[in-house]
Structures are given as C-alpha cells and as structure tokens.
Amino acid sequence: AGEEGEDDAADTFGFGEGAFHTFGSFKKRADGFKDKWFGSWDRTVTDEDIEREYWRVVDGGDLMLRVEYGNDLDVQSHGSGFPTAANTPSDSPHASFVASPWNLNNLPLSDGSLLSYISPDGEISGVSAPWVYVGMLFASFCWHNEDNYLYSINYHHFGGGKTWYGVPGPSAHDFEKVFHEEVPELFEADPKLLFKLCTMITPKVLKARGIPVVHTIQRAGEFIITFPQAYHAGFSHGFNCNEAVNFALADWLPYGRASIERYKDKKRSPVFSHERLVCTIAHRNFRGGAHERITPWVEKEMRWVAATERAHREALMTTAEPAGRVRGH
C-alpha cells in the first residue's frame, strides 16, 4: 500500500509537493477542476470518456496539467475511514465493525496473515497499518508492485470511481522488460525508475507487446485486492477517498524471497527483513486452524534461509586469509 522506493537526494523523477488542504478545501479544488474540464460538454460524461481523456493527456505530451493527490496519509495522524475503538463509542451503530476482520486496521494482523509476526510493535506504517488516499480527477497511482511483493487490499470509502489496470505476477518480468524497452532514456537517467511510482505506459502498448492487462473500475463500497508481484496502476474519476494496507498469506513467502533477490540486484533496501520474519514464524508452535496451514510454507522457506546462510559462510571462509597470516599495511 505504501510508496515503493527510498528517500534519495539524487532522485531524478517523482512528484512535487502540493498545497496543504483540509478535507473540505480539497473537495472544492477537486470538484472545481472536474467541472472546468467537462463543463462545456453537452452530454453526460461516461467512464469511457474519462479514460479517453486521461490517456489523451498522458500520451499527448503537449498539455501541461497539474492535479493534486492526497496520498500515503498515515491513519495514526490523519485518522482511518474505518471505525476504531478510539473514534467509535460502544453504543454506535458502527461499533460492531471495530473488530471486524474486514476493517483494514485489523486485517493485516489477523490470523493467517504473516505480518502479525513482523515486529514487536506489530505495525509498519503503510504496510501493516493503513494509509488513506484522497483523489481528484486524473490523480494517478503509476505502475508499481507492492513492497516485498506483498498482497494489498484497497477499500473505496466514497466518491468518484477509480480505474485500475493490473498485470499478473507471473508476467512481472516481461512487463519490466517492455517498460525498459519503451522508455530506455528514463532508465538510463534513473535505474530505480520502477520504484518511484512516477511513470505511466498505456495498456494498449503493453497488450501490443504481449503483456496481459486486466482492467476494472472500483466503486464506493468495493475492495480491490492485488496479488504478490502483480503490477498495477490507475487514476481517479473525481473526488474520492480510499484506504489501503498490505497483508501476507503463507503462499506469499516464495514471492517475498524473490523480492529480496531483486532488491539486492537493484541495491534497494527491503521494508522488513524476510529472513527475520521467517525465523520468527518458525519458532512458533502452530496447532490447528489457519496457523497449521502455514507450516509447510515456513518449513520450505526456513530450509532456504539455512542453505543460503551456510553458502554465504562457506564463501566467506574460502576467501578469508589463511590462519596465522597477517596482511601488511
């Protein structure tokens, strides 16, 4: 759910900071922008119209357009759209949803999600603790997959629809190859481009290059789930509010390992230690229910962790100076 990438003073690409807004002032800005854009149309604007206009702007390259997006808003400081014990009286009609597993404040740490073992504090902002997103017409989330290739779940609280495009995880490497070939000059300037969430390529181009792309429009009250390593992107159709978080089922573990290998190649730090998570889970005594289904996955992953550590130690001993010899300075 959080931004892929790291703070880097040498970053070449990215989005600039927008203005400071209250919820009301952002709605006024968003509604005004949409009214101005489509105000001269003499018919009802459809979802297809909005999609065509979006790609006309993105692909055209001859129109300078500024929109704002309230993204990555930490629920600890900005509040969650879901009922919580802190904001919901016990006699509220919404009180029963405080403990619901579909409440995104609870889902990442529910039984069966491995993120409940991730740290003593239990939460990482934007990963196991939700972030809120407040959008407007054409506000975009550019092509990316999740940190550590985690699952993600996104809930649309209210407002205009949101277009989503997705590329299945098994096609991720082919997607990245096409991305490099389509914008080589951008990757030459910034090899970590795909971690920056700042580049959009139309699905038409991807499909023409043999990449499978799925498409849907998310409405208020609907969840969208992305699977491990799946690339996704999209944009808002108007003022709206969403909330998102990550989670990890047992079958995510091989994807988590793959993400670590990729991050090593790209010289990028993971959000959390995959090996530490695996070792933490392996020390638990699982009996029955969702926990029992975790065991075969963890055993396989623990064998990989042990074999990798052993290979690294043997390599270190092979390259070490023979005993008793001291290198001169």
Image: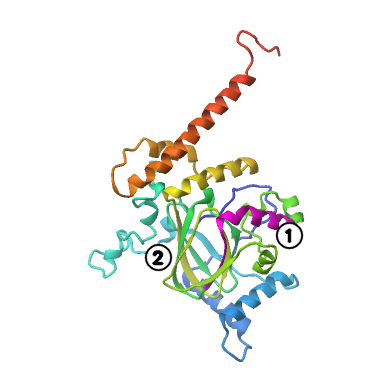
Q: Position of residue 199 (x, y in %)?
A: 66, 60
Q: Is residue 171 in the magenta section?
A: yes
Give the answer, above or below, for where 287 lies relative to 190.
above
Q: Amino acid at mark 2?
A: Gly
Q: Amino acid at mark 1?
A: Glu
The x, y position of residue 272, in whole percent, is 49, 43
- CB within 8 Å, label 1 to label 2: no
Measured as percent of width and height from the top left, residue 326 is found at 65, 10
Query: Quick one: 79 or 211, which is closer to the camera?
Result: 211
Badge 1 is on which residue? 182
Kindly report the distance in space between the C-alpha atoms of the residues bearing marks 1 and 2.
39 Å
Q: Residues within 10 Å of mark 1 (few under 14, many from 20)?
A: some
Q: Quadrant of residue 298?
A: top left
Q: Give the overall secondary structure of the magenta segment.
A: helix
Q: Which residue is mark 2?
A: 81
Q: Secondary structure at mark 1?
A: helix
State the residue at coordinates (41%, 72%): 221
Q: Earlier in the sequence, mark 1 or mark 2?
A: 2
* Residue 294, above or below 66: above
In this view, the mark in front (1 or 2): 1
Left or right? Give the position of 119 relative to 204.
left
- As helix, strand or loop, the secondary structure at mark 2 comes to loop
Q: How many labels were placed on the picture?
A: 2
210 in relation to 285, above or below: below
Image height of 320 relative to 138, above or below: above
| Residues shaded magenta | 162-183
- Dividing the picture into quadrants, the one containing residue 121 is top left
Residue 69: image location, x then y, percent: 56, 66
Q: Residue at x 65, y 70 (%)?
A: 66
